Amino acid sequence: MTWIRSAFTSGAVLVLLVFTALLTNQSVAGQMVINSDMQFDYAMKLYQDQDYDTAQTEFKRFVHFFPDDPRVGEAMFKTGMALFHQNRFFDAARQFNRIIEDRKIQDPFTRESYFMQSRAFVKLGNLGYGQLVLQNFLKLTEDIALQDRIYLELAQIHIQASRSPGIDELDQAQTSLEKISPASARNFKVDEQTAMIRKVRAAPEKNPTLAGLFALIPGGGFLYCERFKDAAVAFALNAGLLLGAYTAFDNGNPALGGVVSFMEAGFYSAGIYGSISAAHKHNHAVKVQILGREFNAGSTITAGTASFSLSLPF
């Protein structure tokens, strides 16, 4: 009886093991195994649907689980682009820097990362860093087409900087444009941008010194700067205060006359300073109006290619 009980127990255990194995196989068979193509395609669909926040997460997941896939460079680049499209420019600059540090310069997405990191810094208002990234890239490449793009972007950064009050980098922009090869000059509209710079240089300006001298006559400085309403207000205000001071002194009220005279001196000085400032503002407004055009450098970065496109509004 003992051997029968033992055989029965062994058989029961064997049946249980077989049953468990069958259940496990069915469970595994019912699970979906995500491969690299599925993960990459899903991330790309999110990116194309402009769900950039989720897309950058899925691209990072792809890089983590499939580090040997040949599309890792593109996934890393698209991660940076997704951050850029969310206006997360600092995070985007860091992501592009990872690509620059981790991947070879021959990789097209590494090359694009230099340009995008520069643009991220420009978006952050750090034009100096944007220029530095491109200048470093310029030292690393001997490709004429890439050098032309670098010179174009450097010129555009100098032009953007020149739109700020008190900054003039148009000579540097001109120098960069002149270094672009004839093969790229037409596509990059070099002649148009050079003509724009010449137009800025030739634009009539208001002389701040003359504006200050004309302001010795109340309202004269504003009149010179073609701010006619301000000129009329300044003239009327100063004339009224002068008349008030004269009347006070003439009526034997020197205290009131002194107060009104003091006020008049303040408004008079402010008129001179305002006229000089108006001349500077006039010159800046003319420059910004001329520079406020949009140039298209042509093409778009696409999956698996190094083609490029950028619309540069300045």
Image (cartoon, helix red, strand yellow):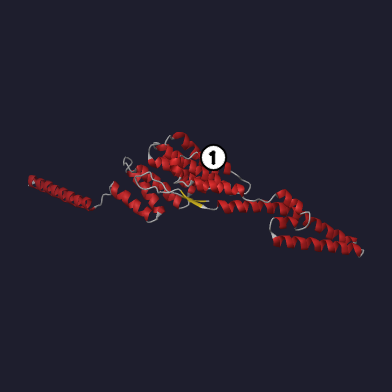
Residue 305 spot, x, y in % from top left: 35, 44
- Residue ranking furthest to the right: 252
Where residue 51 sits, quadrant-wise, is bottom left
Q: Position of residue 123 (x, y in %)?
A: 51, 49
| Residue in the image at 72% along x and 58% along y | 223
Q: Amino acid at mark 1?
A: Thr
Left or right: where 179 falls relative to 58: right
**Apparent side of residue 269 relative to residue 138 in the rendered image (left or right):** right
Label 1 packing within 10 angstroms: few (<14), some (14-19), many (20+): some
Towards the viewer: 67 or 248? 248
Left or right, residue 107 beside residue 231: left
- Viewer can see residue 160: no
The answer to whether residue 201 shows anywhere in this view is: yes
In depth, the one of 288 and 52 nearer the eye is: 288
Identify which residue is drawn at 50% across, 52% down: 294
Name the side, left or right, on which 134 lies relative to 77: right
Q: Is residue 251 above or below residue 8?
A: below
Name the secondary structure under disc 1. helix
Give residue 36's position: percent from left, percent from top: 29, 46
Percent across and percent down for residue 44 are 35, 51
Q: Which residue is mark 1?
A: 175
**Marker count (numbered):** 1
Of residue 180 and residue 314, the one placed in the foreground of this image is 180
